[in-house]
Image: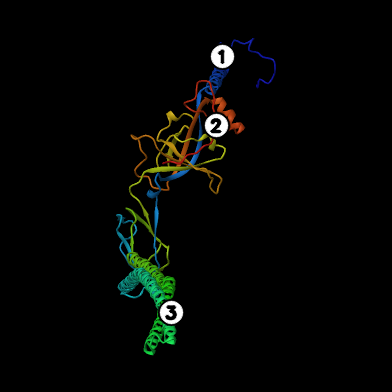
């Protein structure tokens, strides 16, 4: 019958002689279960005090350390029509290899002798500039000749003035002499007339004296006229000396005006020449742009345009090139709360998609298949998802990133922080606190917070 009573008969029956009681005895199993339970609890309590490495887990993708090593789109600098392809997807091209050939589609560039005609225009304009320069030189010579002629004319007039002054002085002396001669002749005539009245002198003597007096008077008048004429010549020479500067300055000013007009035309021709030379250089460069050239060595991964005869516009993408020589890196994104804890040079453990790994985030030494890296750059501006990008490179030369990695592959990262007990980490996770942070070079028992200053990798 079932033992459902509170009264026990174990003290009245010798259970050691009964095998059924021995097989149904649960005291030993209960004791072992209790022991295991106690051991498990002790192990859990001990594990709470084990060291645990705090970490920040992130996700990202594989990229390259240098911008020029990342996938690059090859664009067309000019509009055109595809005439021939020289590559196909998956081909390895070297820098300078031809990818495709384009033909012209704009009417202003259809002339097959466009460069030759542009060169002729440049030569003609250069000849025009040379002619203007020669004309300007001739006007300079003319201006110099006018200045020399002005100096010569001024000296000539000064000499003429000096001669007129000398002549005037001579005429003045002759006038003085004629006045004296006239006075003497008049006195002799009067004296002879008196003597003639007294009958001392004859009539012929009187007439001779009268003739001499009239002759001296005529000479006096002639001398006065000559003196007046020399005075007029002196005034004319002085006036010519005063007006010669204005006359020649007008001629020089006109020559200078012609010279400046010539120089203005020359400068205008020079500007037109520069414009033609610039146009010729543009034509020459455009001829070189009909061939789409690989800007760097790499693999052709994707063609945006296809077929023959397809029209493309300026700046349209033609193909994508992935460089085969590259320094792999990892870009990851962290939350704004974790950003102040990140620093350049900080170690990060990486797990790449497709590479097997055994991860224990808190005990990184026991993880398998992870790769070590260090932070080299941290962005100061968040992306559209309010996440901050950090750039990580390998810091173990003996264990670099796998060679078979491709740009764009997924990566999981674990940024290692401070070593704390397990119970503290559980408490932090339950409260949603950020990981503790410290620097390796701070003094013992002294905490120091790192300001969020970011740097750009060089």
Residue that label 3 marks: 187
Q: Horizontal and vertical percent for residue 313?
A: 43, 67
Q: Horizontal and vertical percent for residue 359?
A: 45, 34
Where is the N terminus found, in terms of image quarters? top right
Most foreground residue, 264 or 284: 264
Count residues near mark 1 (Cα–Cα under 10 Å), then give few for <14, some for 14-19, many for 20+.
few
Q: Earlier in the sequence, mark 3 or mark 2?
A: 3
Q: Earlier in the sequence, mark 1 or mark 3?
A: 1
Q: How is the image coloured?
A: rainbow
Against 57, is 80 above or below? below
Badge 1 element? loop
Q: Horizontal and vertical percent for residue 396?
A: 37, 34
Most foreground residue, 260 or 187: 187
The mark lying in front, picked from 1 and 2, is 2
Residue that label 2 marks: 435
Residue 163, numbered label: none
Q: Are marks 1 and 2 in contact (CB under 8 Å)?
A: no
Badge 3 element? helix
Count residues near mark 2 (Cα–Cα under 10 Å), then give few for <14, some for 14-19, many for 20+.
some
Residue that label 1 marks: 18
The mark lying in front, picked from 3 and 2, is 3
Count residues near mark 3 (Cα–Cα under 10 Å), then give few for <14, some for 14-19, many for 20+.
some
Using the numbered discs, state the Cα–Cα distance from disc 1 to disc 2 in whole angstroms. 64 Å
Q: Horizontal and vertical percent for residue 284?
A: 33, 66
């Amino acid at each position: 019958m079932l033992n459902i009573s509170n009264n026990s008969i174990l003290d009245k029956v010798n259970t050691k002689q009964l095998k059924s009681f021995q097989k149904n005895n649960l005291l030993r199993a209960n004791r072992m279960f209790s022991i295991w339970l106690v051991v498990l609890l002790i192990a859990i309590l001990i594990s709470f005090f084990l060291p645990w490495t705090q970490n920040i887990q992130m996700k990202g993708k594989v990229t390259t350390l240098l911008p020029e090593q990342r996938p690059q789109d090859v664009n067309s600098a000019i509009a055109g029509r595809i005439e021939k392809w020289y590559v196909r997807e998956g081909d390895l091209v070297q820098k300078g290899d031809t990818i495709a050939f384009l033909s012209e589609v704009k009417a202003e560039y259809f002339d097959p002798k466009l460069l030759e005609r542009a060169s002729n225009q440049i030569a003609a304009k250069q000849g025009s500039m040379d002619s203007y320069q020669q004309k300007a030189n001739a006007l300079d010579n003319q201006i110099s000749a006018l200045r020399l002629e002005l100096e010569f004319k001024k000296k000539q007039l000064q000499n003429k003035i000096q001669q007129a002054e000398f002549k005037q002085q001579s005429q003045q002396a002759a006038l003085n002499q004629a006045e004296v001669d006239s006075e003497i002749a008049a006195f002799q005539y009067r004296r002879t007339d008196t003597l003639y009245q007294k009958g001392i002198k004859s009539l012929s003597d009187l007439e001779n004296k009268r003739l001499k007096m009239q002759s001296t008077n005529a000479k006096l008048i002639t001398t006065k006229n000559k003196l007046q004429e020399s005075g007029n010549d002196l005034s004319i020479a002085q006036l010519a000396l005063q007006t010669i500067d204005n006359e020649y300055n007008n001629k020089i000013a006109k020559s200078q005006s012609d010279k400046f007009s010539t120089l203005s035309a020359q400068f205008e021709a020079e500007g037109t020449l520069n414009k033609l030379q610039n146009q010729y250089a543009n034509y020459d460069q455009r001829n070189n742009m009909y061939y789409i050239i690989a800007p760097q060595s790499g693999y052709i991964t994707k063609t945006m345009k296809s077929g023959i005869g397809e029209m493309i516009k300026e700046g349209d993408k033609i193909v994508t090139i992935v460089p085969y020589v590259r320094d792999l890196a990892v870009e990851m994104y962290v939350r704004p709360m974790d950003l102040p804890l990140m620093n350049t040079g900080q170690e990060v453990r990486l797990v790449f998609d497709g590479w097997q790994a055994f991860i224990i985030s808190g005990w990184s030494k026991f993880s398998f298949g992870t790769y070590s890296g260090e932070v080299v750059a941290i962005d100061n501006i968040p992306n559209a998802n309010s996440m901050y990008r950090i750039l990580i490179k390998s810091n173990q030369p003996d264990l670099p990133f796998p060679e078979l990695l491709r740009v764009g592959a997924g990566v999981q990262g674990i940024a290692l922080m401070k070593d704390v007990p397990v119970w503290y980490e559980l408490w932090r996770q339950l409260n949603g606190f950020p990981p503790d942070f410290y620097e390796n070079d701070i003094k013992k028992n002294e905490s120091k917070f790192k300001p969020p200053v970011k740097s750009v990798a060089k």
